[in-house]
Image (tube, rainbow, N blue to C red):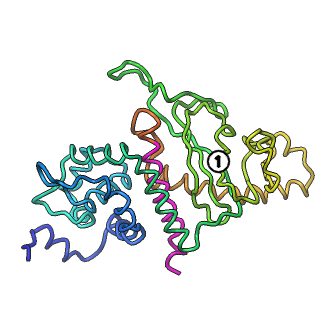
Amino acid sequence: MDQITFSEAEYQNKKRKTRRELFLERMDKLIPWTQLEKKIARYYPKGESGRPPYPLSAMLRVHCMQLFYNLSDPAMEDALYEIESMRQFAGLKLDRLPDETTILKFRHFLEHHGLGKVLFQEVNNHLEKNGLMLREGSIVDATIISAPSSTKNKKGERDPEMHQTKKGSSWHFGMKMHIGVDDKLGLIHSIETTAANVHDIVPADKLLHGEEQRVFGDAGYLGIQKRDEHKHRNDISWYIAKRPSIRKKLDARRQKVENIKASIRAKVEHPFRYIKQVFGYGKARYRGLAKNTQRLHLLAAFSNLLISEKYLWE
């Protein structure tokens, strides 16, 4: 039996748990670790030559914590050295902790094999087995994720995959995250990313899984049913919001209909709240769409788990 360190002894004798510890306990209970590790294991180094790799379970947990708290690679290394609850969550000890290069390489490993999307789908499979991924109706929407507009960098230029767009009276530079969620619980089932100047309606066909009987969207999706990719979908009822200028002219009955549609569409804002406010990803951390998309798939998986938490334990 390994002798415990002073920090571990102090941690075990604490009188109360911090908010970080409570959150990590929640996520530890919610995330289907075994299924996720199986999806990664076939690609993970076996350590047949050179230094033995850190256990897959530990590196996956470190990566998840990095996303929970939106930490850089050096900041994640520092956190492991400083915070006992994080070491406990990852199953690591002070005498052997991954450095920032190891953390970086694991992130690149996931990106190289496109495992962000794979893990997102595996979490959704887990929720579907628990009867939580409903498919009768979908809500589509998009949100802007800002990117640095400065040219003060090594290349002296903005990220070529990001663009600017005008929303209301303000200009934004960055990318868009487009999502499709079910209209009952608000769980994300589809994700697409584009530059910020791409109209919401353009990738909308990729946000529908094909089994919907109804689709909700804001005024940005007006005319969606007339597009070539949707003309054959006679089995769908489209509930798209009227433009604000038109809503002002509606009678009381039609105003009430618009209010009902808006109350249903509100569910699509809940995942955006988790991704941008709880996990702090309101600004793109990387250059290019691919790396940010991989990260957004995992954040969407975590959001789905948190939204469905109260149903999983009923």
In the picture, measured across the screen, residue 287 lies left or right of residue 124, that is left
Element type at mark 1: strand
Q: Position of residue 266 (x, y in %)?
A: 67, 57
10 Å crowding of disc 1: few (<14), some (14-19), many (20+): many
In the picture, measured across the screen, residue 115 lies left or right of residue 96, that is right
Indicate the quadrant containing the N terminus: top left, top right, bottom left or bottom right.
bottom left
Three-letter residue code for mark 1: Asp
Per the picture, the main secondary structure of the magenta-coloured stretch is: helix
Does the magenta-highlighted stretch encompass residue 289? Answer: no
Q: Position of residue 181 (x, y in %)?
A: 62, 57
Compared to residue 304, the image places residue 164 above or below, namely: above
Q: Position of residue 16 (x, y in %)?
A: 29, 75
Does the magenta-highlighted stretch encompass residue 295? Answer: yes
Q: Position of residue 79 (x, y in %)?
A: 24, 54
The quadrant where residue 201 appears? top right
**Residue nearest the viewer, comparing 282 with 312:** 312
Q: Look at 54% across and 74% down and name the residue there.
A: 130
The quadrant where residue 58 appears? bottom left
Q: Look at 68% across and 57% down and name the residue there.
A: 138
Q: Name the residue beneath numbered marker 1.
A: 141
Which residues lie in the magenta part? 293-314
The quadrant where residue 188 appears? bottom right
Furthest residue in direction bottom, as rendered? 314
In the picture, measured across the screen, residue 97 lies left or right of residue 272, that is left
Q: Look at 41% across and 40% down and name the residue there.
A: 291
In the picture, measured across the screen, residue 299 lies left or right of residue 136, that is left
Q: Look at 21% across and 50% down and name the residue there.
A: 78
Q: How many marks?
A: 1
